[in-house]
Structures are given as C-alpha cells and as structure tokens.
Image (cartoon, grey):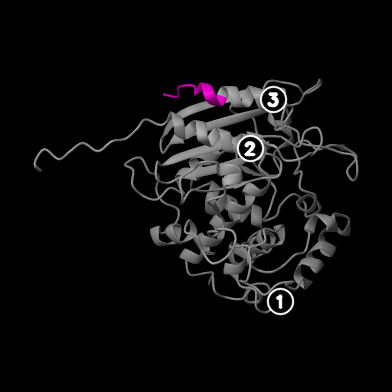
Amino acid sequence: MAVPIPAIDAIIASAIDQRIFPGAVVLVARDAEILHIAAYGTMTYDPPGNDPVTPATIYDIASLTKVFTATAALLLYDRGSIDLAAPVQAYLPRFRARDVTVWHLLTHTSGLDLRLSMLRRAGREGLLAAAYSALPVRPPGSSVAYTNINSFLLGEIVAAVYGQPLDRAIDELVCRPLKLQHTGFRPDPALIAHIAPTEFDREWRGCLVHGVVHDESAYALGGVAGHAGLFSIASDLWTFCRAWLPAGSNHHPAPLLKPTTLTLAITNQTPELAQACGLGWMIDRPNFMGSAPRGSYGHTGFTGPALVIVPHDRLIIIVLSNRVHPQRSVPRHHAVTAAIVAAALDSMPVQCSLPDPQSG
C-alpha cells in the first residue's frame, strides 16, 4: 500500500511555487510494490485548462521515447533480426555514413551532430533526406554526444526490420506484451482533457501544443519518431521499468529481453569516455539521479519527464511534468528529480544482515 513520502510532497510543492512546472505526478516503487504515488498541482497555471493533475494524467514523455525505441531494437536483436555491430547502412541503404553502427546509435557515440529540430520546416521528406545524408563530425566511437538523430535512425531501423511503421512496431513489440494501455503515439483527440499541455509555440505552430507531440522534428515527421512522440502515464511507465529490472523478484513480470541482453544494456558501454551510456540508457548521471548508487540508470525528456532505476534496491522513480509550460526556460527540473531520488532513497527501510546462528 502506498504511503505518502512527506519529503517528496515538500519538494514538489516548492517546485510549483517556483513555477518550475504547474503540476506533476511522482511514482516511487520497489519492484511490484508502489511506495508513493501522488499527483500535484494543475495542468496549467491559468484558466482555461488549469484542472487538477491526477495520477492518470497523460504526459508527452519526449525523449523517454528513446528508451522504448531502444527496447524494440534490442528485442529484434534477441530475435536475431538486428546485429548491433552491423553498419546502419545494412538496414538503411540510403544512409551515407559507412562506419556508423547500430551500437553507435544506442550509445550516442555515432559522431553525428545534425540538429533535427532545425529542419522542422523542411517537411518529412526534407528531414529524412538530411538525416540520411548526415556524416559524423567526430570519429564514431570516440565520444558520447547525446543527439536526437541517433534514436531517430534507430527508429527507422526498427521500422525497416520489423516491416511495419514505428508506432505499430513499438506497440506490438513493447506496449502490448507489457499491457501498457495508456502509452502510444498520436493520442486520441477524445483524451485531450486528460493530457497535460506543453508549450505555447509562438515561433512556428502559433498555438498551445496540446495533445500533439511537442518536439518539432517529431511533429514534422507526423508525430511518430524514434526520439520523441510517445505519450504515457506514470503507472504504465512503472510497468515498463519493472521489465527493465534484473531478474530477482517473485513478482517480476515475464521478461521482454534475454537476461544477457538486459545486463548488456544497463552496463556502462562507454567506460573510457566522459559519460556513461548503456544501450539506450543513461548511467550514473548525478544531474538528475542525484545520490543514486553507482550502477543506476534512467533517462529524461525535454518536456519534463524522468525515469530512474536503482537496481541495488530494485527501486523505480518516475517523475512526470510539463515543465515547458507555458514556455521553455532554463531546465531547473533536473534538480527537482535529483532531490526526489534522494528523498526516495532516504525513505527506504534500512536492510541489515543478521548473523548466521550456525556460525561462531
């Protein structure tokens, strides 16, 4: 049974007072047990639309989409349909860079530096042409540089290999097996009252972005892309994260991935480089993980969401917000997430080892 964690309540109340975001949902779980789930604030600051946030409020999860895309790619790897060491050209013949591999895309070490959002006015075909023509500005594998093009191309590979559009591929490979009923691209307009709006886009779309993807390039691509476009709720993300916990619980759901693949994905694949990356996951990032123990992994999104998994404690922390409402600003939400992680860890019961009565 979930019991409120007062420190988290205070952290979120302060963030709302500081207008870091108008509202949020926080879920903390230990594997199958939800320890804390609460909704705070409102969907917007001012009417109309300033309805209270609920645990079922739907958020644009922005770059958390990348982890779903990576999961789909790794499922295809488990099936023998994708070779992580293969060049991207093997799956996308139009792609020009010969030395960039699937592994480089998953670890953000491709050396590609094309800013997709700058191409939003080029339309779908123009954006695709630019992405396929991109060449590395650094030798692949030499450095970690987090860019959308990596996950975009990975999504294109998933769609090509699976033989279906990416939204259908992620739904059939990831969402349906996990019974994620409120996660998907291009949500039904009938759900608009339950979706937190994001930004007033005065520069390009000329309106409040609400119920459609905030990311400009994903919007230009029709709302579906490997790097952005998914909408979800906290409980669905909890279920997704449970599938990413290493085996070890009687309540663990049927695994999506082979244990060896899951271990590979959550292990630092860039130990010689400045930032730690797994396959699709950020590892040991104190800017949003705070005091989480070494080996923790997670991801963030531009619109405000974050996932943190602490495998040592089998702890899952989910924070959903629309911090870009009404306008994007300096990203202060990472510090909020880090504080929530610390509060969640502090609330965990201390585990001690009793002496073996047979010894001594």
| Residue closer to the observer: 100 or 313 | 313
Q: CA distance from mark 3 to mark 2?
A: 13 Å
Q: Which residue is mark 2?
A: 335
* Residue 202: image tag: none
Q: Nearer the viewer, mark 3 or mark 2?
A: 2
Q: Is residue 204 above or below residue 152?
A: above
Magenta stretch? 1-8
The quarter of the image holding the C terminus is top left
Q: Nearer the viewer, mark 1 or mark 3?
A: 3
Q: Residue at x 51, y 31 (%)?
A: 343
> Is residue 205 among the parts visible in the rendering?
yes
Q: Which residue is mark 1?
A: 97
x then y, percent, for residue 243 = 45, 47
x then y, percent, for residue 151 = 66, 59
Task: State the SS at label 3.
Answer: helix
Q: Quadrant of residue 21?
A: top right
